[in-house]
Amino acid sequence: MKTKITELLGIEYPIIQGGMAWVAEHNLAAAVSNAGGLGLIGAASAPPEVVREEIRKCKELTDKPFGVNVMLLNPNAEEVAKVVVEEGVKVVTTGAGNPSKFMEMWKAAGVKVIPVVASVAMAKMMERAGADAVVAEGMESGGHIGSTTTMALVPQVVDGVSIPVIAAGGIADGRGFAAAMMLGAEGVQMGTRFVAAKESIVHANYKEKLIKAKDIDSTVTGMSTGHPVRSIKNKMTKEYLRLEKEGADFMELEKLTLGSLRNAVMDGDVINGTVMAGQIAGLVKAEDSCQDIILEIMNDAKKLLGK
Amino acid sequence: MLEKLVAIIEEKLNVEGMEITEATSFQDDLDADSLDLFELTMALEEEFGVEIPSEELSSFTTVGSVLTYLEEKGVQA
């Protein structure tokens, strides 16, 4: 399927894998890219040299384009931004802030820059700063979220900018993909479905929790801190929400989540860890390969879109 | 100038009826988040015909800080 996003990124299918912290490492990214989508390495708060190593390992596994998600709140963001250029990465997505200060360096190196946005004004500002496309991410997503839904956000962003828009949040199958296209998107980004993929390195407990999750099993913690996070309900989220309701201060809440995503992803602590996942987790029923996921979505979407 | 700025803030951040002075903090007093600041910046650009690079947003902590920024840019209200 050809869209502005497949042309921009030189990929076969307009499906991008989210740059999830801890989860989006080289095995998953390479598998998605090899299947014709765009895999991402999530730099999150990893040290720059670890990111460089991930990029090099990914190159060994695929000769297709892949990208890096740069988390701008990371104190190392500047060094990571440079590593991306030095390693010849072709695509960068950015999260948690404003990538303007790196834009010149990336553009000069021919890197395609795709900021993740949660509002029309932010999308417009990124377009002006030179972004090649934006990911409009609704609050159905897992992990750090905004406050507008995909259904409402995507068409408004599409109307607000002239660069291509990639829809994210709540998309896990061909129906979601087709719906995103109807809203005016030129591609989709998916996280949750790929977390459960065969090539995903998350702990078996994490995958099991995600695959067993129902429609109403996710919740949002951290509304009061200004950094809301969606994850699957467990002992930690219940404790967090109780403390939040009692008006606990930021530091006390932080204690609960410090290292908690890592603990869930790497050690399989799904009781006290943070099992980040989107609302669409209920739709994810099996551990499929990235290739099967992408082909299934494209086949179903083509039928629905009459293409 | 302050009056005009306050009117824009009131409308864009939905804070009509709240007390807004130069000392008002966007985050602490108006519960504004980063998306609100993007919104406000776009409105200021439109109203005053200036371009505000998005790097400046992090320096917008209080109403007064925005006022100073606009004055330094030579904006006449």
Image (tube, coloured by chain):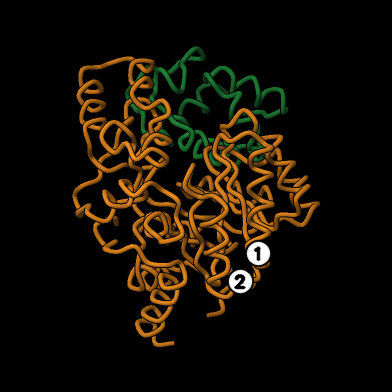
Chain colours: A orange, B green
Q: The C terminus of chain B appears in which quarter of the rendering?
A: top right
Looking at the picture, do discs 1 and 2 lie on one chain?
yes
Q: Give residue B57's position: percent from left, percent from top.
A: 59, 30
Three-letter amino acid code of the residue under disc 1: Pro
- Report the amino acid beneath label 2: Ile
The vertical placement of B66 against A94, above or below, is above
- Tags 1 and 2 in contact by the CB under 8 Å rule? yes
**Which residue sits furthest right?**
A108
Instruction: Tell me the quarter of the picture where residue B51 sits.
Output: top right
From the image, tell me which residue sits under label 1. A65
The residue that disc 2 covers is: A11
The picture places residue A78, in percent across and down from the top left corner, at 70, 34
How many numbered marks does the figure carry?
2
Q: Quadrant of residue A5?
A: bottom right
Query: In front: A2, or A253?
Result: A253
The chain that hosts pointer 1 is: A
Residue drawn at (33%, 34%) of the image: A273
Judge from the rendering whether residue A102 lies leftward or rightward of residue A95; answer left or right: right
Q: Which residue lies furthest to the top in this view?
A: B23
How far from the left and from the top, in percent, is residue A234? 22, 37
Foreground pick, B20 / A196: A196
